[in-house]
Amino acid sequence: MNYSFHSVSSAQINLHNETYRITTRTDTTDLVRSIRSTGMINPPILIDNSGGFIVVSGFRRITSCQKIGRPEFEAKILPSDTETLTCAKLAIADNASQRPLNLIEMSRALNLLSHLLTDRVEFEKTASDLALSDSFSLIQKILKLCHLPEPIQSGVLTGDIALTMALELGEFDAATATALVTIFRELRLGLNRQREVLTLLTEIAHRRNCSILDLTEGRDIKGILNSQEFNTARKSHRIQSYLRRQRYPHIVEKTEKFKKIINGVDLDTGIQLHPPKNFEGTAYTVTLSFRHLAELDERRRHLDKLILDPDLKQFLDS
């Protein structure tokens, strides 16, 4: 690459032009310490632009120099006629050489390339050459990330929101997506639990003819989230229980009534009675475990007690 090395002043650089910004990192503590100790090992890459400069790579390095009171530093200068695609490739490669790109950085990189390469074959080859991705279907998903609301992007960066969930949340308006991300992160829900909560909220909102945001901002959910009495695990359990009760009131009521009856019978630990899933159907299952005939006889006597229990009979007949 036809660089020239020059000492430049930060006053000559247009830091507001972030065309080539790939990094999501804003903290400069590590760089400030490094530059103070050993100087600028890898100078920023700039392109000459009508007497000033645009940053191709090195936003954090430049900011670090400003923080330690070094208004001038050496930089790699690209000629003003350098193609935009070349600058984009340099920006991506320079960032990727520092550390593996996270998903948002990959999204920024792919979006930068997609605006410059309209031919799909060339776009895919370039993305592969820059180690962004070899899968076009995955590329199509990652491309959307950097256009999503900031809370979703932040959740992706911290690992609280998976790619698939981020894309689902991207279908909602910004306020609703933000509210959902807040719940998922505060309750530390894994992907499966996130899906369950989202499904329940969607179905409840549809039944009530209201919005998901109305539900998440409602007194019941807010009351649980803001409670000082419960830890995170307890809040998570109560939120999910509340949503299931609202979505399936009949099933929840029958489940609780069934548990109360079984607890009242005080069954032997070797006997378990299982209702049909969601109480849809009439076939119940009894599981017996025993080590010898004496234990089996004991199980039989407990089973007789269960059979004769009037509450269970009434429950099954209802």
Image (cartoon, rainbow, N blue to C red):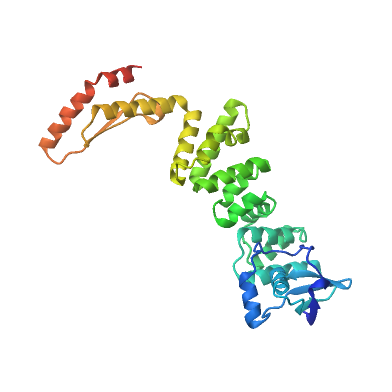
Q: Residue at x 67, y 49 (%)?
A: 149
Q: Is residue 89 above or below residue 312?
A: below
Residue 301 position in % (x across, y down):
15, 28
Residue 70 position in % (x across, y down):
74, 77
> Is 69 positioned to the left or the right of 283 in the image?
right
Name the image quarter holding residue 76.
Answer: bottom right
89 or 211, nearer to the observer:
211
| Residue 103 visible to an observer of this rendering | yes
156 or 237, nearer to the observer:
237
> Is 130 positioned to the left or the right of 19 in the image?
left
Q: Residue furthest front?
A: 228
Residue 122 position in % (x across, y down):
72, 63
**Which quadrant, please, contains the N terminus?**
bottom right
**Which quadrant, please, contains the C terminus?**
top left
Q: Residue at x 72, y 58 (%)?
A: 111
> Is 224 positioned to the left or the right of 99 in the image?
left
Q: Is residue 221 above or below residue 316?
A: below
| Residue 82 visible to an observer of this rendering | no
Q: Is residue 231 above or below residue 67?
A: above
Q: Residue at x 26, y 27 (%)?
A: 264
Residue 192 position in % (x across, y down):
49, 45
Name the image quarter holding residue 283.
Answer: top left
Tag count: 0
244 or 238, nearer to the observer:
238
Q: Is residue 94 above or below residue 41?
A: above
Q: Residue furthest left?
A: 294
